[in-house]
Every structure is written in structure tokens, then in C-alpha cells.
Amino acid sequence: MSRTSGGLIERLNQGPVIGDGGFISELERRGYCEAGPWTPEAVIENPDAVRQLHKEFIRAGSDVCQAFTYYASEDKLSHRGNKAGVYGCKAINDAACKIVAEVAKPAGCLIAGGLSQTPTYLEGGENSKARVKEVVRAQLDVFKENEVDLMILEYYEHIEEAEWHIEAVKEYLPGVPVCCTLCIGEDTDVHGVPTGECGVRLARAGADVVGINCHFDPFRCIEGVKKMITAVKEAGFDKVHFMTQPIAFYTPDANVQGFIDLPEFPFALEPRWITRFDAARYARVAYEAGIRYIGGCCGFMAYHIRAVSEELTAERGDYLPVNCINWGKCLEKHTKPWVRARASRKYWEELNPATGRPYSSSHSKCDGWGVTVGDESLKDDTKS
Amino acid sequence: MSRTSGGLIERLNQGPVIGDGGFISELERRGYCEAGPWTPEAVIENPDAVRQLHKEFIRAGSDVCQAFTYYASEDKLSHRGNKAGVYGCKAINDAACKIVAEVAKPAGCLIAGGLSQTPTYLEGGENSKARVKEVVRAQLDVFKENEVDLMILEYYEHIEEAEWHIEAVKEYLPGVPVCCTLCIGEDTDVHGVPTGECGVRLARAGADVVGINCHFDPFRCIEGVKKMITAVKEAGFDKVHFMTQPIAFYTPDANVQGFIDLPEFPFALEPRWITRFDAARYARVAYEAGIRYIGGCCGFMAYHIRAVSEELTAERGDYLPVNCINWGKCLEKHTKPWVRARASRKYWEELNPATGRPYSSSHSKCDGWGVTVGDESLKDDTKS
Amino acid sequence: MSRTSGGLIERLNQGPVIGDGGFISELERRGYCEAGPWTPEAVIENPDAVRQLHKEFIRAGSDVCQAFTYYASEDKLSHRGNKAGVYGCKAINDAACKIVAEVAKPAGCLIAGGLSQTPTYLEGGENSKARVKEVVRAQLDVFKENEVDLMILEYYEHIEEAEWHIEAVKEYLPGVPVCCTLCIGEDTDVHGVPTGECGVRLARAGADVVGINCHFDPFRCIEGVKKMITAVKEAGFDKVHFMTQPIAFYTPDANVQGFIDLPEFPFALEPRWITRFDAARYARVAYEAGIRYIGGCCGFMAYHIRAVSEELTAERGDYLPVNCINWGKCLEKHTKPWVRARASRKYWEELNPATGRPYSSSHSKCDGWGVTVGDESLKDDTKS
Amino acid sequence: MSRTSGGLIERLNQGPVIGDGGFISELERRGYCEAGPWTPEAVIENPDAVRQLHKEFIRAGSDVCQAFTYYASEDKLSHRGNKAGVYGCKAINDAACKIVAEVAKPAGCLIAGGLSQTPTYLEGGENSKARVKEVVRAQLDVFKENEVDLMILEYYEHIEEAEWHIEAVKEYLPGVPVCCTLCIGEDTDVHGVPTGECGVRLARAGADVVGINCHFDPFRCIEGVKKMITAVKEAGFDKVHFMTQPIAFYTPDANVQGFIDLPEFPFALEPRWITRFDAARYARVAYEAGIRYIGGCCGFMAYHIRAVSEELTAERGDYLPVNCINWGKCLEKHTKPWVRARASRKYWEELNPATGRPYSSSHSKCDGWGVTVGDESLKDDTKS
């Protein structure tokens, strides 16, 4: 079997599957998404920009391409006056599926539809589950039509909401593999459910691949997934696979809600950005921990995913993406002799980069008001 | 006169002119350029990727678009076994001009052809000047054919080589405005010629706009250009304008050759990356110093240029690019109340971002072997 | 009852009791102790220097003065060729008791005899307990003769050894209050016994005051003692008091054996030194956690203890030591107006001091070979 | 000639002369001096404490002992309500001389009387010079009576005031060698007189030894003295010697008035404290720069001076003070094997200590109101 054939589960059984990087944050930097709402109306407004980003990740070695449907539930598209509501859930999800299909299919990549947390859940109230599932079904209709290869349910802070979403997918898209990742840390979700137990509940709800995405740096996410691995195996779910798609920013100082609580979120995270060598180390540590779906979230650019691919070349049947730096060997063609002297893996692995910021500390004090589902402040007060 | 009419000098006389960001480093991250050689064969191999990047900078407010012709001299394209030599200088420069024209012209942006330092100069030897000018003329032929609006000569460590290039442009492309920037620091070029004197020599050689690009962070580049401003004005060149296109990485610890000498160059500079607020402050400080051409080099992505544009909105006739964050006001639509509390300019201006790197120091010890023109180690030892 | 009357337990029942600071490290800096062996032969060689240091801590507000008997067991005095063996255990312990009595008694301070871990325990082997108790009894004979007010048993990494020492004191010095502190962290002793359980075992063995000293910074020590408080109270030991005497160096990055494992130990800890405001905050946080015996270990100088005393002035019947800085008010007499502007508690409480070290990181990678009792490398290979 | 015979100039001609450390700051930490006024009434109130500190520096290898007469001019002793005025200038200076003589003479150390800047100068006004010299003469009377071996005039921010003081010493104590150090940086004194020129003016006024003390870290002070050396030699003063007595705190970020301007002054400088290895490196770099009088100011404790002595052992006729750590060899007797592994010079020389402060930055923003002689804010507004 080649790297580019078979469904998700077959590929995972065979070796590592590389995800893609963070679309919403990268397209914000490029000028096509609005910070704050973080919704994907760019699929309608600037499809070329979205297509180009898919191409970069494919080129970098991604095996799965996620349709750019993040936060594309109807309630979120119009949340707090967000203008994306004018396009509507159906049009946005459909455009996202069409764009990704164009470039992913010829490359042999799998196409993933996506769900994520909804404002409806956070508002709580009566019949919450029914209302959440209704919101979700509107998205699933589109994914059904577009015949996605798998579903990625991601960015849940509440294990309960994730369970409801899994349930909805199982009902509406039977047979489609479900990956589900929470955006939680090593300890608990925001309600205090231990991370290992969260993993078990995801598996029990029917997820084929479980794990953690966003909110924390690669190494903290891996620590969390390791707890899931232990608990899920103990609970007897032998066929479940594990995944992680962390952010590309170091967060040693983040609390329960991760980088959201850091004062630098979302516009001053640059000093925390991981290097490509950090990304390679992430790939290795994740793989050794037993994680088989290895991707990225906010801040993961093509070169980070490329480093992940490069690190796992042997495990992927010697597949190597273009423009790899070959651990610095490429520098042999540099004009300066002292830069040529850096053309080795050893040099880059041992380097501990300076920050260039003598007025910055390494840790921040976290914000975080500890509010959660049902809290007044989470309701959309822009609605009349 | 509108922001999008008139030639370079007219526009500079009227107010700030915003440059674009760093193509070679961004396209390397995206997977289209090779680190080490740093040559622009992507214009032939992946024109869509280059076009897309031009579009992003235009969208971010750039007034000048530089054809992606960096390091595209014949001697560099084949330097040390670099494979770009197969395309050749003419084809690459021509493709670059065609791509930029497609998107820049409709947007009313000026198109710049480009020259930069050549290996031929560094090798020294007899008839060096004649050989350097020959190399340069091959590029200028293409720019003449493509009728560029201006020439940007950039990335010279040696004032002498810059003078020769200016001379060549003046001879071959009479009437075309010439911008020339050295990649030097506040003190001297690599031969010890004081920075102020370098500015005077550029002006005397015929440059219409003089300044500094690459190698140092925005604030160090501004300090250097300030010395040029003082010296050039004292020398009586009243009509000369000033420019800077710094890197987007903090370099308080860099020596004579800037970030090249830092051990993190080129693959571990992430912790030094400036934020969009640093970019805005850069725009303000540069403008107040009398610099009128304000752009970016390596590491400047679209969102950095967008921050420069946003900061200078008033000075540019209230022109505001799309997707500006409006100093964080956009966060009013965020789902978390404590993130909504960050929706103010004051918050972001006062924030001193942490690095998330407790094992990193703020300064590095520099490399730098102090070798310069004529040194054996600078010769292309891959040639037989 | 005044602050300077009553025995230890009476004083603890009434309010906070302030300990003294670290003798061995301070006398090493002053030139009277040898780094490496860390034994107190200075009591014989330079009694004036020891007496002066006692006077400084009394002046700073200490309620208990510890005879300078650290590591003064016979086996340690001659360990690995240590020259202190020539004086012998009896002479050193006796001289230490006489010196402290001279200055502590007139001041109304309590006098503590001391025990700490012994090489004999670490060597393990048959009849280990009997041999350890024999070593300890030689010291206890001297404390009995000198009629100390209390015993401080400190610096144990192994809960078992601490239990044996408590047992020995209970047998030989019945009626003398026993304080016992381990040098462990928040989690476990070096054998993996949880910190809370260690506290319970100390109480069960008969200690009147239990806690943690040395190895970790004030705030990490408090976290450890908090676990002891919870566990000891749950176990029903209602009359037990709690104490801590931490080091005066920040150790966020230390592992099981604390600052010993940090590469900076023992000669390059300066950047980690706490300020007097850190010491004041330590006093407050410790007091609020329910800790009543609050002192210091290595690195605590007179001014740190003075800050502890000053912070707890109200709780100690308005006793204030001389030369307090009154939270900076003293600066009102400074010659420079901008220094006079710092004459407020608010200024100093809010100040986050810079390190002046742009080449230093905030964390270190720990050493630590994980060896423990019975390991070959812990035996005295200098013995034939 | 032995290390302990001959006058100052003879000793300097022969090799390095080691000064002592900072009394006022150390005695404040020990509880005997008041921060703010920084005056030496401890010589009367607690002579034992002062004597002990002299003994420590002698033990650490100091060749010169400075009578503790810092800031002991009549106008400073009563400045802004300072209570030291009750003792008066004569009594304080005399007591200081008597204490130092007791311990320095038997040890063969030279005894230095001292002068420093006076509030009278800062207040400016008519007849300023006459009034300043009158203040100074009251102190000199005492030094004459006590037959000091040399005079150290130190801590001047204004070259002019230093010149007046030298002039006064030359008139009143003819034949006594005069050392004079300004507390300025590499660039200028607070009036903008270049540092090199300041050195020349000190030499021209009659100082036998010139240099810099206090305000900046060792390496910045050396840079300043190097400028003096160049200028003084160029001006033809061949017999002048050079000295420095820097603070023991790193100040890379300090401006014109040094650590006074840093927000951490005077109570939160701990993270900046140099290690003993920094002190040894300081000794070596100073010696190689041609500086022959090498001592310390605020923050220099006995162990720092001991490290200076140890580093210059060979240059001082193999004299080695007691309790040297022998570059870590002493650790061979440590109980833990991984600490014994640190028993080498290489280990400690290569170590770059971490700060343990993840919330601290390496640089601070300076205060500094730029006020100087004659400014209203410098006058003693506590006087009626």
C-alpha cells in the first residue's frame, strides 16, 4: 500500500499520518480572515488564497487536508454581529469542500470535513443538546453531499459538547471515520474532568481517533494525549488511534484554557513561535508516544509541517517533501563561510535560540476568568 | 494627487511610500525557495505562489511591488552548484517582471526592478569593476524591456559595490529613479566606512533614495539611516529621500554583519520575530526620523506591512487596507470575555510579550569571521 | 506573655516564631567555612566570626538561634578526608553551644541544638539503624550538657533517617521540643514517599514541629508544607506545629533534590537570590498557610530575616527590628529626587527586577543521577 | 620586597594591589547602616560589626583597607534630617580610622582615608568652591592626625568637584598618595565631559592613581578606565596608575548615572549580583587592561575579593588567601557524586548561570531625571 491510498484508518494502521497546519491564523496574517470572529468566509471572498494555502501544506507532506470550515456553524457565523452570517453555513461549508477537493484529490490526500464548538452550547439553557445537534446537522448535510473522507471534530473545551457532536456524526454520516480532539491540557477539561477520562469518553462516544488540538504547545499536548492513551487502552478500546494538532507557540505558562488566557493572545505570540527543529522534535516525541495522526493548529505554517514530514521520512516509506532543508545541509551553498559551517543536524539540534528581547520575560501571568458554560458573559449580548 | 498615481519621487514628495515584505524568506517557509542559495527560480517553477504573495502585500497596503529578482544575477544563480543556473538570468528576471505586472498595475502600485550584491564582487581580482558591471547589465537589459517604474538596489555590504551598481543603472536606465540600500549597521559598512559617509557616497553616485535594508532590526536600521540623513543633508543633497527595509527580527546583539552572524540565522530566528505592534511602532519612529520609503525585508509578512499601513493611515490620505485589526478593536467579537477585554490600543501598546522560552537567553554570542572581499573562503570552491 | 519569654511551644501557640538564616553558606562567603565539606569547625577556629553572625540575626528579629552544629556528626567531620575531624564532634558541638549562648540568652532568644543527615545512613548496610543512632547520640550528649531549649533536626532526604533521629532525641533528651524538617519538594522524598505522608510520619515519630528546609525556594517549600499540613491534620495530630526554612534562591526548575541538582550549585546561584521583598512576601504567604515557625536556610542573610520580621510586625506584638527599611520610606533621605520617588511600599511590591544578564536563561537543565541510600557512589571512597 | 611592605606607589609599581569591597551596602544588609542616608555612624554605634567586616576583606586578600568614612562630611551627616549629624564629622572619621588601624596594621595592609562627593557641591551657588573645601578640610584634619597611608577620593559625578577635592588634599596632606575615582560610565561625566578627558583632568589636578568606582558593573567600569588610560598616557602623565572599584551588579542597561537610575536600586539588585567567577574574570580583564589597583564597591563581599586575589595569585608572588575554592576543587569532598563532578575550573568557567526568574526580563528601563548641580530638587528641602 502506498502512502496515498486507503482510507484514514488503513493509513493510520500502517504508519504516521501527517495533518495540515492552522488555516484561520495564517489567513488572518495574510489578510483574508478577521481576527476576533475567526470565521472562514474567505472560502467565498478569496478562494484563491485558501487554495494556495492548501497547496502549501500538500507540498509540505500533509496526508489529510481539512476543508476550511472552522467555526462555520450558523450560530457562530452571525455571533456578536459577525458579518459572515450573510453567506450562511451552507454556502461556506460547501465552498470549503469544493476548494479543498480541487487540490487534495489529485495529490492523493484525504479530505476532512470539520466541526468545532458552537456558541449555542456555551449559552446552555433548556433543550441545549437538541439545539446544539440541530446546529451541527446543518453542517453535516453539506459534508454528506460532498462525500468527505473523514470528519475532524476539534476545539472542544467541554467533553460533553464533544460527545454530542460525535453522536450527531455517527447518526448522520455513518461509516465516516471520526477524529475528535479537545483543546485541553494535561490535567482536565474546563469542568475538571481528568484528561485521561475525557479520552475514554470520546472513545466510548464512538470516535475512531481521539486526542488534543490547539491551546497548548506541542510538548504539553503530547503529555495530555499520553494520559488519554493510557486511560483509553486501560478501558479496552484497542482499535482507537491517537492524534494531536497543537499550536506552534510555546506555552509553558498557560493555565486551563491555554494560550487564550495568555496576555499575548492573539496578536503578540511571535516570541513563542516554534522553530522547524522544535517541530521535528515534536514529530519524533509524538510518534514515540504512540500518536499516529500528527498535525498542527494555529501558527503551524508549511515549513513546520514540512519539518514534521522530514523527521518521519523513514516511517513514511522514505517519502520526502520538496524543499526540505535536509537538517541544514542546504546551507552548504551559502555565500558566507561561517554560515556554511552551520550545515549540519548537530548544529541545529544543539542550538538554543536567543530571543533578541532583553525587555521580555519568559513567562507571563495568565488572564482567565474561569467562566464556563451558562455564564452570562458568554452569551451574545449583541443580540437584541 | 491620489495615493496611486505619479512616479516614485512624486509620491515620496507627497507622503510616505510603503514597500513590501521579504519574498525569499517567506517563499522558503511556504516551500518554494531553497534556503542557502536564496535564489528566485520560483518565478518559473511556481509562478502562482509568487503571484499570491504579491497580492497579499498589495492587499496590506504596499505602494511599491518589487519584482522577485533577488540574487538573480547570472553568477549567483549558478554559485556553488546552485541549480537555478539552468533557467538563467534573463528568463528569471523576465518572469519576475511579468508576474508582478499582472497584479501591481491594476492596483496602481509602482513596479521595481532589483539588483543586489554579486559573488563576482566578493571574489575581487583584476578588472573587478568591469566584470561586476557586466553581470549587472544582463539584468538591466530585462528591466529596460519590461519598463519598470523604479530600480531598487539593495543588500550591499560594501559601499564600493553599491556605487558601481548605481553607476551601471544610471548609464543603462537613465531617468529611472534609483533607490539604494546597504545592509549595514549604525556604525560602518564591512570595510569600516562610517554609515553617514556611506549615505553621502550613495547620493553622490546618483541614488535618488538612500538607506539601509536587511541584516538588522527596524530600530537599529532607523538609527543607521538617521546617521545617513544627517550626513547627506550636511553634504547638501537636498532632494535625496530616505528609506529602510529592515528584517522583522530583533537583533540587539548583532555585530557588523547583522543577523547573518547570529547563531540562529537562518532557521531559528522565530523568537526574535516582531509583532504587528512592533511593526506599527517602527512605522511611526521611521516616519518621525524623516524616512519616507518604509518597507520590510526578511520576516516581514503581509500582516506586518498591514500594521505599517494602518499606523500611517492619516499620513496616507486616510487610506486603510482591508482586514486591519483596528488596534485590537476586532476582538470585541471574540467569544471569551477576557479576550474581549483586550480590544484596545492601550492594551496592545503596553503589552511586553513573554517569550515562552525559559531555557533561552535574550542575547546570543555572534559568529563572524570578519572575512571580506577577496578572501579565499568567499570564492566559489565548487567551481573546477 | 512577651515575645521573649516561654518555651518554643508556648511561643508558637501565641504567634509566629522567626528562625535565623543560613550559617554555613554565609560563613563560606565571609571566608570561614570550606565549600564542599560544609562543616562548622569555624566555631573553634574563628569564634568571633560565628558570634557576629548570630548577633546579626538576633538584631534582625530571630526568636530562635541555632547553635552552629550543622553536619557536625563524627562521620561527616572526617568524611572524604575532611580536616574538621581533628577537632572532633564533641569539641565542635560544645563550642557552638557556648558561642550561641553568649549572645542569644541576653536577648531572650531560644537556643536550638541541631542534627542533620549523616553519611552513615547513606552508606546503608547491616545494623544501619544502630550505627546511625550511635553517631547521633554522640552529638546529643553535648546538647544535653548544654541544656538547649529545643532541638532542630533538619536536612533529611530520607524520611526513614529522620524518624530514627527523632527516636534518638526522644530517648535521650526527653521533654525537649523537637522540630524536624526534610529537604524535599512538593511531591515526594527521594524514595517516592509523598510529602504529605512524610509529614504524618514525622508527627507519628514524635516531632512537635514538622516541615521542610533547604533545597527549594520559599514558595515551593510552602507548597510542600501545605501538603504536610493537610495530611497531618487529617491524621489527627492536632497539636503539631509547622515550619519552613527554605533557601533564598529561586528554584522553579529544580527536580527531586532541589538546588543541589541545578548546575549553578553551589557557586553561581547569585542571579536566583531573592530580594527582601520576596522574603516579606514569603513570610506573609507562609503565615497565611498556617506555618508558624518561619526561618531561612542557605542564602538567607540578616536583611532577609529582617524583612520577614518586618512583615509580621503586627502578628508579633508590634515588635520591629532595628534598621528596617520601612518598605522603602528610608529613601526619603536619598540625595537623588528620582530615588526619593521610590520611597513607597507600592513601588517595591510592584517592581519585577531585571536580571542584568542578557546571556542567561531563566531555567537550567538539572543534573541528578538519582542515586540514593546504599549506592556505591555515595560511599566514602577516600577511606582505605 | 614583600606584598605587605612599601607604600602604595611602590606596591603598585611592583604588581597588582587589591582593594576591599563595599562597606556601606554590606553593613546595611547586616543591619548596621541606614539605606537612604548611607552614612557610616556604625563606627560609633557598632564598632565590632565594622571591625569584623575589615577582617573579612583582609582575610580575602585586600592590600588596602579603607577607613569606613564614606559620606562622612558634616553636610551629609545631617542632610535631610539624617540623624548621624549628632555624632559629627570629627568623631565619626576618627572612630573609623581607629577601627581600621587595629586590624589592618598587624596584617601589613595600607590604611586609606576617604572623601566623597558632598551635598554642598550639588547645591551650587556663590563661593561654592570655598564652601566645598571647607567641608572637606574638616575631614582631612582627622586623617592627618591618624596618619593614613593614602587618601581615596571616590564617587564623584562631577569632574570639577573631584578636582577641588584633590586640590584640598594636596594642600593639607602633602606627600600622601591620592587615588581619585569618578562614578561615571564609558562616555562622559554627568556634564558631558568625555571619560578620557576626565582622567586627564584628575591627573593634572595631582592624583597619583585615577579611575572609576561604583555605578557600573566591572566590565563597563573597565571600558571607562581604558579610555582614561589612553587619554592620560597620550597627555604624557607617565607615572599615573589606574584603578577601578566597580559595583558587583550587572548593569548592561544603565545610563549616565549607572545603577542609581535602574528601577531596582537599591533594594532589588539581587538578580544582577556577580558570581565569584565573574569577579575572577573581572580581575583578569582589568589587569590585562593595565589597571593595577583592583577593588570593589557596593555588592562586593569578601568572597568576591577572595576570587580577585585567587585569580591574581601568580602576579602577587603566589600569595593565596585562606578558604579559596581552588576553582571548585573543594567540591571533591561533597557527598553527592554529581556535585563532585563539578570540581573543575572548566566547569565553572563555562557555566552560564540561569536566573530562576521566568517572570523577569534581562534589561530594565532606566529612570533618571537628568538633574544636576544647582537644580532645586537636589537641595535639602528639609532644612528650614
Image (spheres, coloured by chain):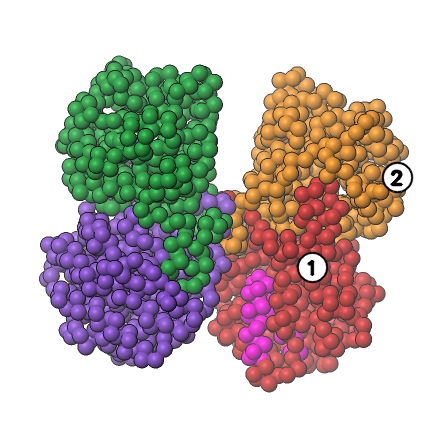
Chain colours: A purple, B green, C red, D orange
Residue A194, picture quadrant: bottom left
When the figure is inspected, residue B139 is found, relative to residue D82, above or below; the finding is: above
Compute the Cα span from label 1 to label 2. Answer: 33 Å
Left/right placement of residue C187 relative to residue B265 reads right
Percent of width and height locating residue A74: 26, 66
Percent of width and height locating residue A163: 28, 75
Viewer-side residue, C144 vs A168: A168
Can you name the residue that lies furthest to the front here?
A384
Q: What amino acid is labelled 1 in the image? A: Ala
Percent of width and height locating residue B40: 22, 35
Which residue does the image show at 81% across and 46% down from the upper left?
A: D82
Q: Quadrant of the N terminus of chain D?
A: top right
Q: Chain of mark 1?
A: C
Q: Quadrant of the C terminus of chain D?
A: top right
Which residue does the image show at 74% across and 32% down from the upper left?
A: D374
Q: What amino acid is labelled 2 in the image? A: Lys
Task: Give, as a single range, the part of the protein colored magenta.
Answer: C207-232
Left/right placement of residue A356 relative to residue D67 reads left
Q: Is residue D163 visible?
A: yes
Q: Is residue B238 magenta?
A: no
Q: Is residue C226 magenta?
A: yes
Left/right placement of residue D105 relative to residue C196 reads right
Q: Which residue is mark 2?
A: D90
Which residue does the image show at 28% across and 75% down from the upper left?
A: A131
Q: Chain of mark 2?
A: D
Viewer-side residue, A136 vs D67: A136
Mark number, residue C307: 1
